[in-house]
Amino acid sequence: MGFQTEFNSVCKFKSDQELYELLEYGRGKMVKQGFRVFPTGQKVIAYTPNNVAVAIVKIVGCIAEINFQGQEVTEVEMELIRKLTDEESRIQTDLAYEMFFGEHTS
C-alpha cells in the first residue's frame, strides 16, 4: 500500500462518461485505481481515454480510500476551466505522446 504521485500536468480519463459529465456540466469527478495524489488547486490538462487533450481543468478535491469492495481507489473532483481549441489540443496531444504516452500513431 502506498500513494502514487500523478504527474502534475496530466489528468487522463479512463471513462468516457466521466469526461462527458465534466464537459457537459462544468464539474465532475473521476475514479482511479490505487491511492494517488492529485494536487488540489492546480490546473491540469484533461485527456480522453484515447490520449487526446481536450480541456484545462482545476483539481478541487482528491480523496483516497478503500471502498466497500476492499479496493484502494482515489476520487478526483474537478471543474472545467475551458475546452481547448483544435490547435491547442493537437499541440498538447503531440507533446503528451512525446513526454508520457510513448509512440504516437496519428
Image: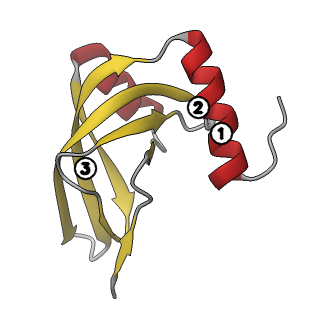
Quadrant in which the N terminus is drawn:
bottom left
Q: Position of residue 33 (x, y in %)?
A: 39, 64
For label 2, the SS is: helix
Distance from the alpha carbon under mark 1 to that under mark 2: 5 Å
Q: Which mark is residue 95?
A: 1
Q: Is residue 45 above or below residue 42?
A: above
| Furthest residue in direction bottom, as rendered | 1
Q: Residues within 10 Å of mark 2 (few under 14, many from 20)?
A: some
What is the three-letter code of the residue carrying label 1?
Leu
Amino acid type, residue under disc 2 in the picture: Gln
Q: Would residue 98 be visible to someone looking at this image?
A: yes
Check disc 3 and report its element: helix, strand or loop: strand
Q: Nearer the viewer, residue 84 or 75?
A: 84
Mark 2–mark 3 distance (CA, rounded to whole Å):
22 Å
**Residue 67 visible, this orientation:** no
**Circles 1, 2 touching at the beta carbon (< 8 Å):** yes
Q: Mark 3 sits on what residue?
A: 76
Task: Name which residue type carries label 3.
Answer: Val
Q: Badge 1 local density, few (<14 within 10 Å), some, or many (20+)? A: some
Quarter of the image for residue 63 reads: bottom left
| Residue occupying image coordinates x 41% and y 25% | 55
In this figure, what is the number of numbered marks? 3
Residue found at x 18% / y 52% = 40
Residue 16, how many percent across, how many down?
A: 47, 31
Q: Earlier in the sequence, mark 3 or mark 1?
A: 3
> Which residue lies at the image location 72% right of the left edge and 47% below the top edge?
98
How is the rendered protein coloured? secondary structure
Provide the secondary structure element on which disc 1 rests.
helix
Is residue 86 shown above or below 55?
above
